[in-house]
Amino acid sequence: MRSGDGSRRGATEHRVRGQAGGAQFDARVGEELAAQARLYGLSAAKAQERAKALAGQFELDDLLARPVKTLSGGQRRRMDIAKGLVHGPRLVFLDEPTAALDPRSRANVWQHIRTMHAELGTTVFLTTHYLDEADALCDRVLVIDSGRIVATGSPTELKARISGDLVTVGVDAVDLVKTADIAGKFADEVDTKPDTVSFRVPRGDLVMPELLRALDAHDISTTSLSVQRPTLDDVFLILTGRTLAEADHAA
């Protein structure tokens, strides 16, 4: 990376921000941002100007005089991302940017990542173990298993590989076989467990009324009933044969 005046440069210029961050805990937020700008060749005045601009973009205005060590996890993560943008890179690598954050802070960081992409035109390369995060933020997803890319595409394209919605019917054990037979009229593959019957269909919402009528006609009472749209977790399970948590444990 080359130092300069903070303007956008070639497409190969990038910035990497990791999970832990690299801020000096005893420094103040404004000092950290300005110091980062100075490292990229900005004058003292321009560095202060850039620090204030980034503080405004990442809701850090009221924190500029605060020591980094007093920030919450979400505030520190936003400050670290702001440091990565001080020189206006076209490409930013974010490594687990919301790891260990509470739901509110996580949603906040999500919004800033969206803004970074939509308003600043920054390309964001995001690595994450939260597949709902990839679904919400990414235009294109690469699924990696044991160091190998096993699938790539938009979240919608990847979820389309799953053959429909998952319909799950909870019933008493005595009605399990009969319920499975009825479910077999809607899908070729039916999965039975001690108290549930499940199957996949293209549109679970359309199948549900007919399924309920069929169950009622056979005097079968349900203990639960749900329709679940495919998720990227389902995609990972289908592609690898195990959940992401199981893959992490194996690694």
Image (cartoon, rainbow, N blue to C red):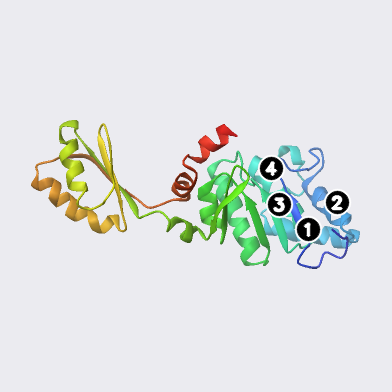
Task: Report the quarter where the C terminus lies.
Answer: top right
Identify which amino acid the numbered label 4 is placed on.
Gln
Measured Cα–Cα span from mark 1 to mark 3:
9 Å
Residue 81 circle label? 3
Counting residues from the N terminus, which is met first, the one under dot 2 or under dot 1?
2
Crowding near the residue tagged with mark 4, few <14, some 14–19, many ≥20 C-alpha atoms within 10 Å: some
Q: Nearer the viewer, residue 48 or 125?
A: 125
* Three-letter residue code for mark 3: Ile
What is the distance, in whole Å, between disc 4 and disc 3 at their CAs? 10 Å
Label 1 vs 4, first from the N-terminus:
4
Q: Can you identify the residue that label 4 sits on?
A: 19
2 vs 3, front mark: 3
Precedes in sequence: disc 1 or disc 3: 3
The label nearer to you, 1 versus 4, is 4
Q: Circle 2 sits in a helix, a strand or a loop, which is it?
A: helix
State which quadrant residue 3 falls in.
bottom right
Image x and y of residue 74, in percent = 64, 44
Q: Which residue is mark 2?
A: 35
Instruction: Give the structural element (helix, strand or loop) at label 3.
Output: helix
Tell me if residue 89 comes above or below residue 97 in the rendering: below
Residue drawn at point x = 19 percent, y = 33 percent: 172
* Mark earlier in primary sequence (2, 3): 2
Numbered disc 1: secondary structure:
loop
Amino acid carrying mark 2 in the image: Ala
Element carrying mark 4: loop
- Asked if 82 appears above or below 6 in the picture, the reply is above
